[in-house]
Amino acid sequence: MRILRALLAILLLAGSAAAQQLVSFPTQDGGIVYADLYGKGERGVVLAHGGRFTKQSWAKQAQVLTKAGFRVLAIDFRGRGQSRGPQSKSDDDGAEYDVLAAVRYLHKAGTKTVSVVGASFGGEAAADASIDAESGEIDRLVLLAAWTARSPEKMKGRKLLIVARDDANDEGPRLPKIRANYEKTTGPKELIIFDGSAHAQFLFDTDQGERLRAVSPQSITAATIFTPR
């Protein structure tokens, strides 16, 4: 789990935005996803934004990940930017296919491993994508204030779930549902509970990065983030 903590620390340490390339690719259900592609590394990261955001919200985090040697793909979900789903579906139905399409795009581009970082709505889509993914497609999964309503025990890869203790919506605190998901997941996993109430990507605007670095003292480099199994 130190590796996943280091990945989150890199996201929290983000600096200025990096240059990117706009790419697009189809989804398995007939949609099309537009995304910003950063870097040329053999280890890939898909960044899946929350419901209030777009792919541009990850620009600072993509900069740091790219400098650490990763190929980064920040997607716009269907209904955001130019991305769209099939006419037979409405709203966010099928968002997990957007994540899967991004994962497979990176694999086809030559990455050897692909991890997914999903925030809030994007985290649920990432969790559902990991359930549908083939074995080995998703290596690691970081979920910021997110859970799946499906079968969490079927999520694949190493998992890191993160939430602020007092993060809540109209239905109440998010922590109980996230903890219930965590308890049902299998394989290597960790749950980190931050102080405060910042939700998902808003954690990047708090001082929580210092706390994370305190519990993850190893050097933040590509070698320490994604070491071979």
Image (cartoon, rainbow, N blue to C red):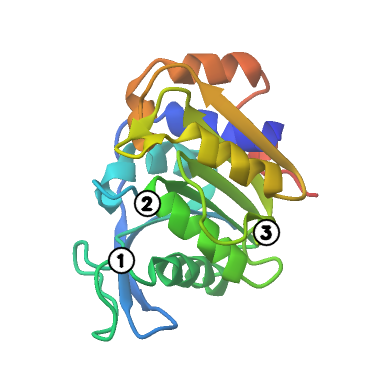
Q: Which is more N-terminal, label 1 or label 3?
A: 1
Q: Amino acid at mark 2?
A: Phe
For label 3, the residue is 156
Label 3 vs label 1, nearer the camera: 1
Quadrant the N terminus occupies = top right
Image coords of residue 74 (percent x, y): 37, 54
Q: Secondary structure under badge 1?
A: loop
Between 15 and 132, the residue placed more toward the observer is: 132
Pointers 2 and 1 in contact (C-beta within 8 Å): yes
Residue position for label 2: 121
The structure residue drawn at horizontal position 34% and vertical position 44%, both measured from the top left corner, is: 58
User: How far apart in space, not on screen, are marks 3 and 1 (Cα)?
Assistant: 22 Å
For the point 46% across and 34% down, the residue is 11
Residue lying farthest to the left in this orientation: 81
Instruction: Please tell me in which quadrant of the rendered image residue 14 appears.
Output: top left
User: Viewed as shown, does residue 22 lie left or right of 44?
Assistant: left
According to the picture, the residue beneath numbered tag 1 turns out to be 92
x, y percent for residue 123: 45, 50
Left or right: 157 as drawn, with respect to 48: right
Is residue 30 placed above or below 144 in the rendered structure? Answer: below
Q: Earlier in the sequence, mark 2 or mark 3?
A: 2
| Residue 40 in sight from this viewpoint | no
Dot 2: what SS? Answer: helix
Label 2, residues with CA under 10 Å away: few <14, some 14-19, many ≥20: many
